[in-house]
Image (cartoon, rainbow, N blue to C red):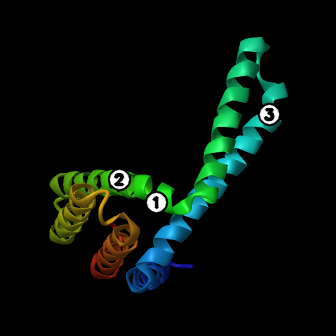
């Protein structure tokens, strides 16, 4: 697959994910929360299965504690997704702020044609993250899905609007 086709396909997938997140914010936030819980639980199980590969008793103990922590945290998130969404909202807000700052740094370092779009993407993403953090925890149950969807939309737009090297 050539790079242009891959960029267009990626942009379309980002637009579809953005539309779903904006149209169904509670559902998308809950799905994201549950996915993280399942991934954490699976990571815990894999850590526990690898205890025998750890060097020495201390290594085995630490790997065991790590595996149990991941497993228990993952099960907790799956068992209590709404409560976990509140914490996830703060995490996603901080993540979007960080992503926005990294986009701004990329715009500052890049002198190409797409610098303006990268700059706009960074500003919008950082502002969305700031809104999540500022309104936390009151808007936790809808904000993650909506604001994350908006961020995905701008990322897809930037992919379609910039040359391949940006």
Q: Which residue is mark 3?
A: 50
Q: Is the C-beta separation of discs 2 and 3 under 8 Å?
A: no
Q: Is the C-beta separation of discs 1 and 2 under 8 Å?
A: no
Q: Using the rendered image of the protein, determine whether residue 90 is visible from the camera's viewpoint.
A: yes
Instruction: Determine whether, in the image, residue 142 is placed left or right of residue 30.
Output: left
The spot of residue 146 in percent (x, y) is: 35, 75
- Which residue is at 29% across, 50% downward? 98
Query: How many discs mark residues in the rendered view?
Result: 3
Q: Which residue is mark 1?
A: 85
* 129 is higher (above) or lower (below) than 3: above
Q: For the residues marked 1 and 2, what is the alpha-carbon distance in whole angstroms? A: 9 Å
Instruction: Determine whether, in the image, residue 162 is placed left or right of residue 46.
Output: left
In the picture, residue 113 is in which quadrant?
bottom left
Instruction: Determine whether, in the image, residue 131 is placed left or right of residue 76.
Output: left
Q: Using the rendered image of the protein, determine whether residue 4 is visible from the camera's viewpoint.
A: no
Quadrant that contains the N terminus: bottom right
- Which residue is at 22% across, 62% downward? 131
Callout 3 secondary element: loop
Front position in the image: 140 or 155: 140
Quadrant that contains the C terminus: bottom left
Crowd class of label 3 (few under 14; some 14 to 19; many from 20; radius 10 Å): some
Say whether disc 1 or disc 2 marks the residue closer to the N-terminus.
1
Say whether disc 3 or disc 1 marks the residue closer to the N-terminus.
3
* 141 is higher (above) or lower (below) than 153: above
Between circles 3 and 1, the one closer to the viewer is 1
Crowd class of label 2 (few under 14; some 14 to 19; many from 20; radius 10 Å): many
Crowd class of label 1 (few under 14; some 14 to 19; many from 20; radius 10 Å): many
Say whether disc 2 or disc 3 marks the residue closer to the N-terminus.
3
Residue 90: image tag: 2
Q: Residue furthest right?
A: 52
């Amino acid at each position: 697959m050539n790079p242009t086709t891959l960029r267009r396909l990626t942009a379309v997938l980002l637009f579809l994910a953005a539309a779903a997140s904006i149209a169904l914010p509670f559902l998308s936030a809950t799905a994201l929360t549950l996915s993280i819980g399942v991934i954490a639980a699976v990571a815990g199980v894999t850590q526990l299965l690898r205890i025998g590969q750890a060097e020495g008793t201390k290594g085995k103990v630490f790997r065991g504690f790590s595996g149990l922590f991941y497993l228990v945290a993952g099960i907790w998130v799956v068992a209590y997704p709404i409560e976990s969404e509140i914490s996830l909202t703060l995490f996603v807000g901080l993540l979007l702020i960080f992503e926005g700052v990294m986009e701004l740094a990329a715009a500052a370092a890049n002198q190409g044609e797409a610098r303006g779009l990268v700059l706009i993407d960074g500003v919008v993403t950082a502002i969305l993250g700031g809104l999540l953090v500022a309104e936390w925890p009151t808007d936790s149950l809808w904000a993650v899905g909506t604001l994350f969807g908006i961020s995905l939309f701008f990322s897809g737009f930037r992919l379609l609007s910039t040359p391949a090297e940006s």
